[in-house]
Image (spheres, coloured by chain):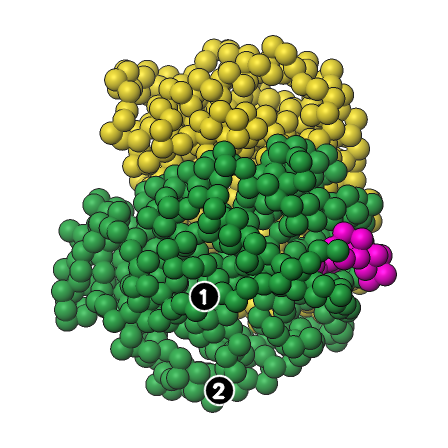
Amino acid sequence: MQIAIETFRLDNGLFVTLSEDHTAPIVAVNLWYHVGSANERPGRTGFAHLFEHMLFQGSASVGANEHFELIQRAGGTLNGSTWLDRTNYFETVPSNQLELALWLEANRMGYLLPAMTQQKLDTQRDVVQNERRWSMDNQPYGSWWERLPALCFPPDHPFHHSLIGSMSDLDAASLEDIEQFFRTYYTPDNAVLSIAGDFDPAEARRLVERHFSPIPRGAGKPPLPDMTLPPTLEGALRDVVQDDVVLPRLFLALRSPVFGSEAYYAASVCGAILGMKKGSRLYRRLVRERQVASEAQSFTYDLTKGSDLLVLDVTGRPETTPEQLERAVHEEVDRMHEEGVTAEEVARAVSLIETELLVSLQSAGDRADKLSLFATYFGDPSLVNVQAERHRAVTVEQVNAFARARLGPENRASLLYVPREAAPATTARELAEAGAR
Amino acid sequence: MSTAAREEGRASGPTPRPLPSAPRSYRFPRFERATLANGLRLFVATVPKLPLVSISAVIDAGATAEREGDEGVAALTAQLLLEGAAGLDGAALADRFEGIGTSVDAKADWDSAIVSLTVLAERLGEALSLVRDMLRTPAFPEREVARLRDERLSELLQRRAEPGAIADDQFARAVYARGARYAVPAGGSSESVRRLASGSVRRFYEQRYQPATTTVVLAGDVTMAGARTLADALFGDWSGTQAPADPRAVDTASSGSLVRVVAKPDAPQSELRVGHVGLPRRHPDYFAVTVMNAVLGGLFSSRINLNLREAHGYTYGAFSAFEWRRNAGPFTIHTAVRSDVTAAAVQEILREIDGMRSAPIDEAELTLATSYLDGVFPIRYETTAAIATALSNLVIHDLPEDFYDEYRERIRSVTRQDVLRAAQQHLHPEQLRIVAAGDPAVITGPLSELRGAPAEIVRPDASEGGA
């Protein structure tokens, strides 16, 4: 399955990808800015995400809350999201409303600042602080979102700090920060625009030029510090957290090859063998056979710089002690590290990944987002069309080489959640050690 | 570039707000229906864009069909379909599905059990044959019955640590009468689940899983002719009839206290649920109520969300919903707010409910809701899985065949008067139940004061009761 792709670049640097498909009268507009929490300066953790909220507060020609209203009135869906190294904004609308979506995105890319007020900033700060309470502070295990990157990346690394941000850093964010961040990062040459669905390419190009061409190129963004990391953690790391939870839960993270690299695909297949769906090793062994876990899965962060993280996420059962859970997961990783995988396991993982890729291409919004992803990270949206093939080409030997190189004990970071009452005696010391790292 | 130069660069100014071009027409995918001699029904939507087919097997075996005391058996039975069939154990069955690149889901909600998956079209026959094994010859091994029952018990334990889940469960108990099925989670309470055994599972299976109460929905790169051949071969010789379910109370309203605080000392937020018994899915006011709810709290730009989030900054989001089930599911406003503004947030919610009932909404609010629901319709059915789910809902709720063809016109024809009438008839301020899971030291006093009656305080692990 290949999707149609056409690209061009405006004089101001905006990179544009078009993918035409007339199955339904809908069109997706998707804009990635190459900025995320990694670009935040000290004392401003959470700012990239707070800024994303401010982009829905209107611009020169758009009133407060009008962005949402205009798209919904047009019969469209929309949202935005912030990640460690990018921020995206997207809408899917009936195809006759394409120009509205482009105009809204262009208006806030070019003319956001006239609409920014202290009151809007204060309200969105409250909203984001409530988002933090809801998703992390008042959620069992919720702190894993910031504890896991903090454990796996060194303190001075751009991926180390909290994406949602600390309450005090959020308190400190000012209108001057908004202006500076906007001028530095929200420029056409730091963005990728993708359009997927029902449109005429010549007409779409004309509309993009009309609305985006007047926006001037930026002055360049400060380079990120060197992101390079050793291929492994170079020693076992461990953080034990007492939380208001009933069941122990282990997040076991490994450094793995960055997303899109040659070595990434074997790692992706290895991760799927360990923790994708019920036929995976962790589910089969720990949930089904040994019954020490109630849930088991794996995922990757898909980072393209420094190091990716492959994470195993396993929740115990009421009678499982945290130590039993941790030992059981390590045993499975040890076994794969030492004995490797079978051809059947590779075939199962590749089949599942392939179907998942195909299923995700059904929606215009997902297609546009994938085009933006490959264009932003690699300057080549057509990479979306080779992902299945890359996974299919992975061999048992490649997975085994990855398992030998990266699944060893020196490349494991354990973030273990234990019910508050049942905390093991050693915890206080371990916590102190983790804090001192 | 200096700031001044950049401003100058932008001096050409923003482009003017555009007008929409002419809309292109859209029709919900065509589908065909057939019934086998044994009563099994087949729905097929041919959508050949990608070489994929979504399967959804819908069985009339949901939680409301359970006997009193067996709460949770419907969910357990559906999950156990994955744990062994036709001589394969659960691990082998998972291998078969995953070997052809798909993973299967089996679950039961209030009204039905559903087995669903999406598979490459060239693998449809193999996948449907495995679904046949699951539906017709499940093994229900003792060991897996015990394992899944224990997993459900640990999930229930886990829920007691999640403020949102605590609020949901306690809200259901506050809204529905003790003994009503809807008062207890669809998957059962720890009291009821603990009692379940392979005997109760097998009995439920034998009573409910029958050809005449099963519908197989296929959407994607498949034709009726191909589907019919497969269905005849795989399900044609399946026989049996469904026994009628024991009648039991499902949606009876409670008459309990109006304000309940679920104690989570030191919680930084309150998980808030406000509402009452809503309406059954086939209520004649479905469209008017859908539009009314969109304006009240269904959309981002709804009254409740703009008030609580954008005007006050109390929350990350606040929404309302009528949960559409065969019987009267709950009408719920749900949000999580900073602890110290809990009572103030409730007050704003009550004000918005009164506002909906006291005056017609603005024309602009009406058109926002109707044009959103109308316009977003094609976006909802982009995937084969979404189309299969839509067709499943026709079956579950016994909706007319042209429901999706008529939907947009029915939405567009709702008037401001219809919305006012829907609000006056179906929002009941005097029946509102208010449940807040949060810090009792901070929220109990203000909530009691607001409602002029002492709030009842319960622990998160208060008996799930109701059955």
Range of the magenta residues? B216-236
- Asked if A425 appears above or below B155 in the picture, the reply is above
Badge 2 amino acid: Asp
Look at mark 1 in the image and give the residue it sits on: B246
Which quadrant holds the C terminus of chain A? top left
| Residue A337 position by quadrant | top right
Please report the residue visible at 29 percent of the width from the left and 69 percent of the height from the top: B254
Can I make out residue B260 in this image?
yes
- Asked if residue B164 lies left or right of residue A192, the reply is left
Please provide percent x and percent y for residue A179.
47, 48
Q: Report in which chain the residue with disc 2 lies.
A: B
Q: How many marks?
A: 2
Supply the letter of whichever chain is green.
B
Q: Label 1 neighbourhood size at 10 Å, few (<14), some (14-19), many (20+)?
A: few
Q: Report in which chain the residue with disc 1 lies.
A: B
Please provide percent x and percent y for residue B442.
17, 53
Supply the letter of whichever chain is yellow.
A
Whichever of callouts 1 and 2 sits on the residue coming sooner in the sequence is 1
Look at mark 2 in the image and give the residue it sits on: B418
- Asked if residue A336 lies left or right of residue B170, the reply is right
Badge 1 amino acid: Asp
Can I make out residue A143 in this image?
no
Which quadrant holds the N terminus of chain A? top right
